[in-house]
Image: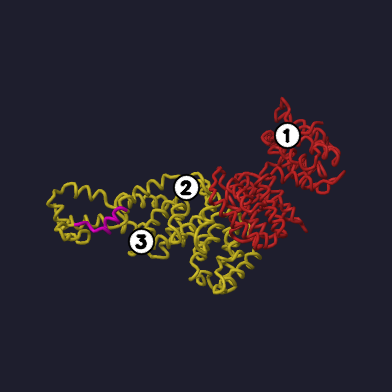
Chain colours: A yellow, B red
Amino acid sequence: MDPPNDFEALTKAFSGFGVDEDLMVSILGKWHSEHLESFRKRTPKFFLEDERLFERWDDHHIACLTKEFPRFKDIVVQWIMHPWERDARLVHEAITKGPQAYGLLIEIACTRSSEELLGARKAYQSLFDQSIEDVASRLEGIERKLLVALVSSYRYEGSRVNEGTARLEATTLAIAVKNVDKKNPIEDDGIVRILTTRSKLHLKAVVKYYKEIYGKNIDEDLDTLMSLKETLQCLCNPQAYFSKVLNDAFKDDADENTKEALTRVIVTQSNVDMKEIIEEFDKQYKVPLTQKIEDVALGNYKDFLVSLIRRVA
Amino acid sequence: MASLRLPDSIPSPAQDSERLSLALQGRGVDEKVIVWILGHRNAIQRKQIKDTYQQLYKESIIHRLESKLSGVLKTAMILWMNEAPERDAILANKALKKKGKKINQLQVLVEIACASSPDHLMAVKQAYCSLYECSLEEDITSNISTSLQKLLVGLVSSYRHDRELVDFNLAKSEAAKLHEAIEKKQLDHDDVVWILTTRNFFQLRATFVCYKQSYEVAIDQTINSSGNGDLGSILRGVILCIVSPEKHFAEVIKASTVRYWTKDEDSLVRAIVTRAEIDMTKIKGEYFKMNNTSLDDVVTRDTSGVYKSFLMALIGAKI
């Protein structure tokens, strides 16, 4: 037993994504009450001196642990779950959370294939006895029109693109973006129709023509229009989108919703385009994704994440 | 209830295919045999014949029928031989691409969205993407005026819940919202579109009942008397298809025939072919109530030849 090192190791075992179960068993399992008392007294990060003279666990940290311990359970359950049920439950969670979670609705509606989205809609009906669009039509906020149309979409997925129409729609989009002071583009029926009925290949062409005609990437003009920006990114460049979501999850000030994305992205994209996401992450943030996960995640949760990624890398 | 009558014992698909092949051989075509066989087979049996014919003769029976038949009989038979999702995708495409189309030609979109199950609508959309290399929504956008796009795209995009779940408080409040929108002539208001396109059919029927209770006049009559043009006409079609598809199709058939001739062959064929295996018996009942004449008599009177025999077979008429 080596108290200073053990205390440090144990503190680390509680401080990341997930918890280091093995370390906890090997250290804590041997401790008697005097070791526990020592740990409590010497770890002000977790314990406060209560006025009634006992070392009290900090409430905020307990709340964190309530989220960290189940991360392994969550990833296992999500991984086994049918993708339709998984997406339906994610959508339901997002709808319950309200406007702060609308990005998740956009993510699911735009990054899934037409059949996958239809599957999610079917599962949602089985689980919650309503259609997603029915519930979405009663959401609050200006994103409502866009969200209802996005979750209702069944896009053509073939290779045919009408270049002339794509070029025209690039101009329509540009005009709408320029007139943002008069009207938010996502409240415009025509813009919503383009975003929600065109194939992904067509929209990539629209983005290409935007660059050709106006000399810059469209997302440079969309900084104040987050929903529109996210929609286009999810539809045209999902790897960049997921890469960013992962990076946000690793940030020090990330809240629980942002951190949950680590599980969600790895699980939902593992059989889709994980390879491309890993490459994009490497390119954007100059550190391999597996390395980052090794640094910040712990225990069984970390091992599971790494093995899911290693399958494709 | 389907009106299609099947014989007590059905030959095997191979036997049927052989007889059909004979009827389609040579310089002429034996239309009577084709109608006699195919006019008395249900969807599953027709698919079996299609597959067997392909295996035996290395050719699609639909292609063969297309090359040998002509006129209205050809139109009707090709629709009949396609599986329901492809058939409706073809009908939707035809309606959208027609030059100088009138508003009632868009009824087929309303029928597909509102007079059949949500699963069927999805199957039609999948078939549409395969057949025409774009989505149904995109073709609606390219071929329909902007004022009607929002409603029509909304109608075909929706995958409604199919359980009988009704929230009566919601029905009441949404009846009020609809009433307000109709009075203000805002028929393309987002709320109107969302209510009509995303709620399940049982919920909407309850909403329409609440409407009648609250305002003492049926919702479609309010739309009618506000004189709301093309959009109003489509909306009335939506409401009728949800409340009573039999009445809708009885009206379609009535509008398509005039004493001694058929003025709108396409609509007559569509109504009969698409509903023969669904609710043609009920439609005939409604038709009689409306016109005091049986549909059998009208088809006998207004059509002729082998085409007439085909329609009579589909509507289960006593020959």
In the picture, the disc for residue A25 is none
Which amino acid lies under the numbered mark 3 shown in the image of this protein?
Asp
Left or right of residue A87, residue A258 in this image: left
Q: Which of B236 and B279 is in front in this view?
A: B236
- Residue A220 coordinates in the image, percent (x, y): 50, 71
Q: Farthest residue in the right direction? A: B260
> Magenta span has A111?
no
Residue B143 in view:
no
In the picture, the disc for residue A255 is 3
Q: Quadrant of residue B102?
A: bottom right
> Which residue does the numbered mark 1 point to in the structure image?
B4
Residue A31 in view:
yes
Q: Do labels 3 and 2 share a chain?
A: yes
Q: Nearer the viewer, residue B263 or B259?
A: B259
Disc 2 on helix, strand or loop?
Answer: helix
Q: In which quarter of the image is residue A47?
A: bottom left
Label 3 or label 2, whichever comes before in sequence order: 2
> Is most of the magenta stretch helix, strand or loop?
helix
Q: Nearer the viewer, residue B25 or A263?
A: A263
Q: What stretch is highlighted in magenta?
A: A56-66
Q: How far apart are marks 1 and 3 (CA)?
A: 63 Å
Q: Farthest residue in the left direction? A: A34
Which amino acid lies under the numbered mark 2 shown in the image of this protein?
Pro
Q: How far apart are marks 3 and 2 (CA)?
A: 25 Å
Name which residue lies at 58% across and 62% down: A192
In the picture, the disc for residue A83 is 2
Which amino acid lies under the numbered mark 1 shown in the image of this protein?
Leu
Disc 3 on helix, strand or loop?
Answer: loop
